[in-house]
Amino acid sequence: MTSFAEACGAADAPRAAACDSLAQRMHEEGLGLVRVGWCDLHGVLRGKTLSAAAVPRALASGVGMVSTVLLKDTSDRTAYKVFEPGSVDALPGFGFANNLLLLPDPASFRTLPWAPNTGWMRAEAWFDDATPVPIDTRRILRHALDRLAARGYGLKCGLEVEFHIYRLSAAPRDDASLDPERAAWPGEPPAVTMIHPGYNLLAESWADRADEPLRIVQRTAEGLGLPLASLEIELGPSQVEAVFDATDALTAADEMVAFRNGVTQALRRAGYHASFVCRPPFPNVMASGWHLHQSLVDLKTGANAFRRDTPAPGTNEADAQHTLSAAGESWLAGLLAHGRAMTAFCAPTINAYARFRPNAMAPNAVIWGRDNRGAMLRVLGRAGDPGTPDRRAEREPLPLHRGAGPRRARRSRPRPGRAIGERRALRRERGAIAAQPGRGAGCARRR
Amino acid sequence: MPPSLGEALDALGADERLVAAFGTQVVDWFTQVKRSELARFDQADDKDAWQAREYFSRF
């Protein structure tokens, strides 16, 4: 009889080997529970916790999950009236709160550093007829990367994650949000104090005050196998930043999900509240952003496809091809052309728009610049520069999942226009264009 | 850049090439879920308290 995993086309030899090694590891390490995690539209892991005995069946047959979990907004309310005829006609396979199946990937198996004897596996969502569920964010990213690979490119990303850590005012079990008399949908936020007072950017003494929670962050990230490079004290009160080495885009997305969800859980156990919301609800708070470093990799040679050895003839620093290859310029043009539309994915909550203010390190116009933190896109490095191979273009804030990409390379390829704020180049041109941030739309204009 | 989530969703829907790249189904699903969030926010009396419960507690 064909198993569900086989019907999905997932049951190949490497998966069978991963299932065997997982079974052996569970036995050797005495793991009693395994969580099956699926990342929802909002970046939150959902799923079920399996007993060790149920794991082989889950790997072969999947784990049932009600389909409304894919239709929920940030408060956990279902955005579709699934019992009313016609309400989910646009989503074939959904309706009447039917079941979907989560098929775990045994290759993603890991143990959780903060939870004793507990394993974890990532899953993707399938309909019960073994066809893939299209509104699964990881699958959307995979399909975009497949289209990119068909053109000979891979995407490499580096994460920089700003977030806030607070200390719970009460013991975790006495938190007001756990008072049954006050339960609500959604519930009250916890009462908190800060781990550092802020307004002392990168101060070592503030890092020392925050040492205990930052060590939990470090242990959690490293225990999950994430390539953590640094932990930093940010400007805002109780705000910190974690920086990761660049990896391929799918790995970076998986790592972001693992980091955010893992750090939140591990800190909570120790009496802290981690918040990845853009602007926590306090006066004098600094909103968090994040930066996504992007570069394309030539899949044949493994080389950085944005890099060029020397500036293109006749260009100066305000021209993209002074620094970037033709492919890099095209990528930049695509990000600019779709910058307005991609904002909904990059800033997907009401709260996120609190960050867009004039004269802040958050962009309010679709423009690019060189090392200019006021621009939506920063082009880093120089032609022939071996030092920043993975950090060529930066977009702020981070797209959850990218769909904009290179406009098709062709003779009339759209061009990104001039960099904003290139003083040296501008001086040479005697003010040929003005460096006015308000001219953002003009900057994106095609030449 | 769009200054609010509602305007950002409008801009997303208006970008035909991007909608085609993601697929109409994906964009419509994302937009409907996000419009649900916006509709509840618009009805809230205390916007700050709403955001504290909706986002700070859970994200």
Image: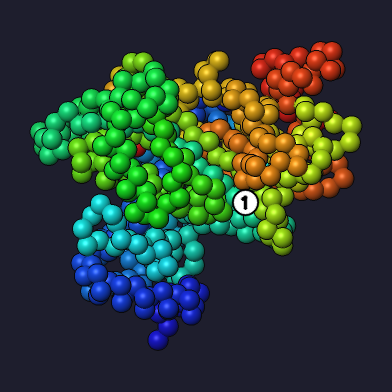
Q: How far across and how far down the image is residue A418, in percent? A: 77, 27
Check the image and name the residue furthest to the bottom.
A1
Q: Nearer the viewer, residue A176 or A210?
A: A210
> Which residue: 35% across, 20% down?
A198
Subunit bearing disc 1: A
Coloring applied to the structure: rainbow
Q: How far across and how far down the image is residue B29, in percent? A: 49, 45
Q: Amino acid at mark 1?
A: Leu
Check the image and name the residue furthest to the right.
A314
User: Helix, strand, or loop for circle 1?
Assistant: strand
The mark tally for this picture is 1
Q: Nearer the viewer, residue A126 or A387?
A: A387
Residue A3 falls left or right of residue A213: right
Q: Which residue is mark 1?
A: A155
Is residue A333 among what the camera can see? no
Task: Tell me: residue A269, above or below residue A374.
Answer: below
